[in-house]
Amino acid sequence: MNPFVRPAKSRVESLLRPALERIQSVAWLVAPPLLRLALALPFLRSGRTRWDGFLSISPATLYLFENQFKVHVFGAAYGFPAPDTIAFIVAVAEIALPVLLLLGLATRLAALALLLMTGVIQLVFPDGWANFHLYWASLAVGIMALGPGPLSLDRLIDRGQHRRDIETRR
């Protein structure tokens, strides 16, 4: 048998093709929002613990960023510069970026920002890679690759812009 000649499609493959195509079309609809939800939840949960009222960082968060969280690079641990400012930025990002993901708004940028945050978190907690960070990074990359999906504000905005472009050309 010549390895370069494709054999004729089997009868089973021909019978399964419509079902497999249907599964794929449903997955293309469902996968992006599920990926967005899976990445948003751990960051949103963490972000909720950072606050002690409206725009008031909790004392525990400030303590962590001032005294506990250290960046591990080149065999040494370094404190964050301006830890109060970094704590505030992280607290805002851990709420705002997951909300953007859940809405499907600026989706790829939000996923990229969370991927970068995951990289920094990896430097703070080097042992967390296999348990959490690998999964968060994989979800972020998947979202950046697939995009927001059809169930998103990004898609709704894109459709509205496309309609305006068509009307403008007329």
Image: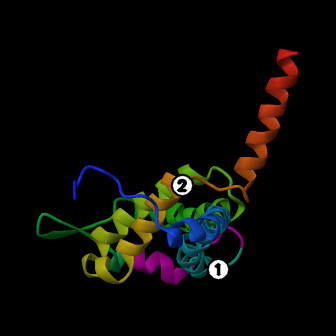
Task: Inspect the magenta stretch and tell me whether residue 107 lies in it.
Answer: no
Q: Residue at x 82, y 38 (%)?
A: 160
Q: Nearer the viewer, mark 2 or mark 1?
A: 2
First along the sequence among labels 2 and 1: 1
Query: Who's the residue at 78% across and 41% down the image?
Result: 159
The 10 Å Cα crowd at callout 2, few under 14, some 14 to 19, many 20 or more, is: few
Q: Residue at x 48, y 53 (%)?
A: 145
Q: Nearer the viewer, residue 6 or 159?
A: 6
Q: Amino acid at mark 2?
A: Leu
Q: Secondary structure at mark 2?
A: helix
Q: Which residue is mark 1?
A: 52
Q: Which residues are magenta?
A: 54-65
Query: Image check: 166 left or right of 145?
Result: right
Q: Where does label 2 land, which residue? A: 146
Q: Is residue 153 left or right of residue 80?
A: right
The C terminus lies in quadrant: top right
